[in-house]
Image (cartoon, helix red, strand yellow):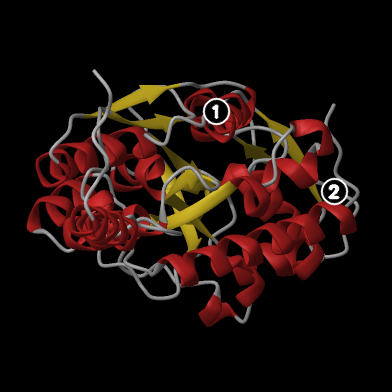
């Protein structure tokens, strides 16, 4: 049956409806309505370390708090190996818009330590915010003749005798901190890499290695039990859990004010601005909660609330800082 011609009134009505529809079609960035649809499925947080460590536990605590707020499940996926590079690369290559990364110091150190690592933090990731921080502690065996940092410097500065400095692996924060210490104090050190702090601990306690810069969570029990002696902490302020232990700042060694940290990131460009802003707000809320404060205190780490912009700047500065140490000390992978 032939189509009937439209009347002038019908044509005007149709044009009005079409114009109205075009006006309401969103252009450019997602609107609040479309942003509210994110996340539309399970969100995963990649942790580039084995289960049970500080980054892993922190991620699981946040997953519990973020899931009900986001209206989707949040799972933690461990991808350890290659000094965190396996997990970081996996996150960088994910384009599903529902992947996050719990990053740490190693992710900004690795590209300078090994240029073939495959990722660049500034190029490949958007910062959501910082999560936590923990200081390093300079420790010696309990039976060591070294009683303090000034004592250590007085005994060994400029001497030919080298002290062994155990660390959790070549190119790690602990290793680079020992390099900074040698450069600043003139105390000759021989770095001794181990496969993690747990492997180092028996040799440090027994005195087979002279000293080490260790993360507070792993070393605190051994300090309290009297197996190790703490000489200084890299935190900017004194710690109630380590009474009488000075900061490096108080010893005029500000360059040793380093922190182990964790940060939440998203693969670059995979989550819209509205989604990142929502995540930032929820992360801030979670980190300020009593749940996080209590759970993090048990890990000997402190929550760190910092904006996306400030976190991005911090990550760039950390990469530049440790990149300079690696270049100046001519540190290369084996």
User: Depth-wise, is mark 2 or mark 1 nearer the camera?
Assistant: 1
Q: CA distance from mark 2 to mark 1?
A: 26 Å
- Disc 2 residue crowd, few under 14, some 14–19, many 20+, Cα 10 Å: few
Of 96 and 25, nearer the camera is 25
> Could you tell whether 169 is left or right of 236 in the image?
right
Observer able to see residue 211: no
- Disc 1 residue crowd, few under 14, some 14–19, many 20+, Cα 10 Å: few
To which residue does mark 1 refer? 196
Of 98 and 147, nearer the camera is 98
Residue 20, by quadrant, is bottom left
Badge 2 element: loop
Badge 1 element: loop
> Could you tell whether 96 is left or right of 321 in the image?
left
| Residues at discs 2 and 1 in contact (Cβ within 8 Å) | no
Observer able to see residue 144: yes
Which quadrant, please, contains the N terminus? top left
Q: Residue at x 64, y 41 (%)?
A: 172
Which is nearer the N-term, disc 2 or disc 1? 2
Residue 244, by quadrant, is bottom left
**Image spot of residue 208 (x, y percent):** 63, 30
To which residue does mark 2 refer? 161
Q: Residue furthest top?
A: 1
Residue 152, by quadrant, is bottom right
Which quadrant, please, contains the C terminus? top right
Q: Which mark is residue 333?
A: none
**Image spot of residue 281 (x, y percent):** 25, 63
Of 137 and 319, nearer the camera is 319
**Image spot of residue 228 (x, y percent):** 44, 44
Q: Residue at x 17, y 52 (%)?
A: 292
> Could you tell whether 190 is left or right of 69 in the image?
right
**Image spot of residue 246 (x, y percent):** 45, 72
Q: Residue at x 64, y 63 (%)?
A: 316
């Amino acid at each position: 049956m032939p189509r009937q011609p439209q009347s002038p009134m019908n044509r005007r009505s149709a044009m009005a409806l079409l114009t109205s529809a075009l006006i309401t079609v969103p252009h450019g960035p997602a609107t609040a309505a479309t942003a509210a649809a994110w996340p539309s499925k399970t969100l995963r947080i990649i942790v580039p370390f084995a289960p049970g460590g500080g980054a892993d536990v922190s991620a699981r605590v946040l997953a519990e708090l973020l899931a009900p707020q986001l209206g989707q499940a949040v799972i933690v996926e461990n991808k350890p190996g290659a000094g965190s590079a396996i997990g970081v690369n996996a996150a960088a290559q994910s384009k599903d818009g529902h992947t996050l990364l719990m990053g740490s110091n190693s992710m900004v150190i690795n590209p300078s330590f090994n240029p073939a690592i495959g990722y660049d933090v500034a190029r490949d990731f958007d910062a959501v915010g910082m999560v936590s921080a923990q200081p390093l502690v300079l420790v010696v065996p309990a039976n060591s003749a070294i009683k303090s940092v000034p004592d250590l410097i007085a005994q060994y500065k400029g001497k030919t005798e080298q002290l062994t400095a155990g660390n959790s692996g070549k190119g790690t924060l602990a290793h680079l901190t020992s390099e900074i210490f040698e450069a600043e104090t003139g105390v000759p050190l021989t770095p001794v890499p181990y496969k993690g702090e747990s492997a180092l601990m028996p040799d440090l306690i027994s005195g087979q290695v002279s000293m080490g810069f260790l993360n507070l969570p792993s070393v605190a029990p051994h300090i309290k039990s009297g197996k190790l002696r703490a000489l200084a902490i890299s935190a900017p302020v004194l710690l109630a859990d380590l009474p009488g232990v000075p900061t490096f700042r108080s010893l005029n060694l500000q360059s040793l004010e380093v922190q182990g940290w964790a940060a939440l990131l998203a693969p670059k460009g995979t989550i819209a601005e509205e989604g990142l802003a929502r995540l930032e707000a929820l992360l801030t809320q979670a980190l300020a909660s009593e749940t996080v404060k209590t759970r993090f205190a048990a890990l000997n780490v402190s929550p760190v609330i910092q904006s996306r912009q400030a976190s991005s700047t911090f990550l760039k500065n950390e990469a530049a800082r440790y990149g300079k140490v690696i270049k100046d000390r001519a540190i290369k992978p084996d």
